[in-house]
Image (cartoon, rainbow, N blue to C red):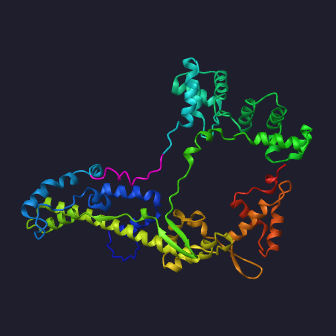
Amino acid sequence: MLKQTLQQKLLQKLSPQQIQFIKLLQVPTVSLDARIKEELEENPALEDISLANMNDPVEEYPDKDPDEDSFSDEDQSAELDEFNVDDYLQTDDINDYGSGQYNGDDEEDRKEIPIAIQNSFFENLQQQLDLLALSDRDFLIGQQIIGSLDDDGYLRRPISSLIDDLAFSQNVIAEEQEVEDMLKIIQEFDPPGIGARSLQECLLIQLRKKDQESPVIKKAMAIVENYLDEFTKKHYDKLERALNINSDELKEIVNEILKLNPKPGDSGAVAGKQLHIIPDFHVTNSDGVLHLTLNARNAPELRVSRSYQEMFDHYDKAAQKDKKMKEAVQFVKQKLDSAKWFIDAIKQRQQTLLKTMNAIMNYQYEYFLTADERKLKPMILKDIADRIDMDISTVSRVANSKYVQTEFGTFLLKSFFSEAIQTDTGEEVSNKEVKKILEECISNENKRKPLADEKLTEILKEKGYTIARRTVAKYREAMGIPVARLRKQL
């Protein structure tokens, strides 16, 4: 038996405007232009003032008396003929709007990052394969091998799997020796070391392309072939005894091995991996007074289309409204509301960015004046959230994706946040200060006898920072510094 009940629930939900603001807040400056352009193309009721000023005539209504209403009867009918709402109501795809008025920025204002056009790693290998005089069968085997390489340039799939792939995809029944022979040919390609199945084979391929008469190369090959484990763990004393050489000779051999490329596949893609950062803020120092400015790209000149607003007023005041007219009113109102929400979200984004960065700058004022990391105060997200009376998640969204340009470099806002450490005197300092001292100690250490974590802990205690050895190890690893044994040099 069905039973009807009445229940009350209290739910907390984000409005569409709040969701739009949150999404925009996370967008970095480098991506904001694309996001605005996307909105302009999707919503014809939204206009970019800079583009509108370029396209608008000097006189907006040259044929009309300024005292007349914006829409006379003739103008209304002309406007209705010009704008057919059916074109929008009958299709979901309105992206063609951008192809008419928004054909691109003014050439003088376009400051796009030039993209280098170059062949990819796999294209370079394919070109080298094309230059060889091979049978169709060997060519297909070579193509299969090149296509099976990973981004580092290694062949990590077994030969048996390649044979199966050739049979299924190319209808080529290949023998294991045929694939091995073709692999050896590809291993002669540039960059050296390509097609190796292990780090050891990769290094040996590169060494075989060097002068085989050189004693240093011969001993380097012996180390890679027979003592690679001892070499990677820097057990130099064992290598000296095994090869019957002194430390100077070993140093020369080690330097030769260190010149080799352990990831030959990366060499062709280095240029494409450079990250271009556009700062969201600029902090300048004028005689001891800091000035904060927001990147102009964060403040686009947007407005609601006047023609759409007038069109809506005309539809809304119409004496008779049939179904088609109501659909037109609803459509235009939706576009107008969406444009207003987007403009409000952009303005709210600007205010939030400036408010958050201003609080961070004032909190770390001494650091921004001196660029001395020792001046960084302990600061967590809650400290800034309390100052600007906003949620911690809002501060986190700003700090995780925004950059500030100073006179001493460009930094991610997140880098200014750090935990507090208490000294012997009871003073709270930033853990960044401790990391800076650790970095200086390690950079000034004797590379033949690097400082162990225990010794680094003792040095910090002498300076008044009482922290555990495991904390020192944690900070060292966070800075990307290996353990003492791996920092040892000859």
Residue 37, position in %: x, y? 36, 56
Q: Residue at x 19, y 62 (%)?
A: 60
Quarter of the image for the N terminus: give it: bottom left
- The image shows residue 427 at horizontal and vertical percentages of 71, 81
Main secondary structure of the magenta stretch = loop
Number of marks in picture = 0
Left or right, residue 388 beside residue 380: left
Determine whether, in the image, residue 211 is placed left or right of residue 362.
right
Q: Which residues are magenta?
A: 101-114
In which quadrant of the rendered view does residue 411 lie? Answer: bottom right
Residue 412 percent location from the top left of the image: 56, 63
Query: Is 20 on the left or on the right of 264, as rendered?
Result: left
Give the residue furthest to the bottom: 426
In this orientation, does residue 396 appear? Answer: no
Q: Please tell me whether residue 29 is drawn above or below residue 236 in the rendered image.
A: below
User: Quadrant of the rendered structure where residue 323 is?
Assistant: bottom left
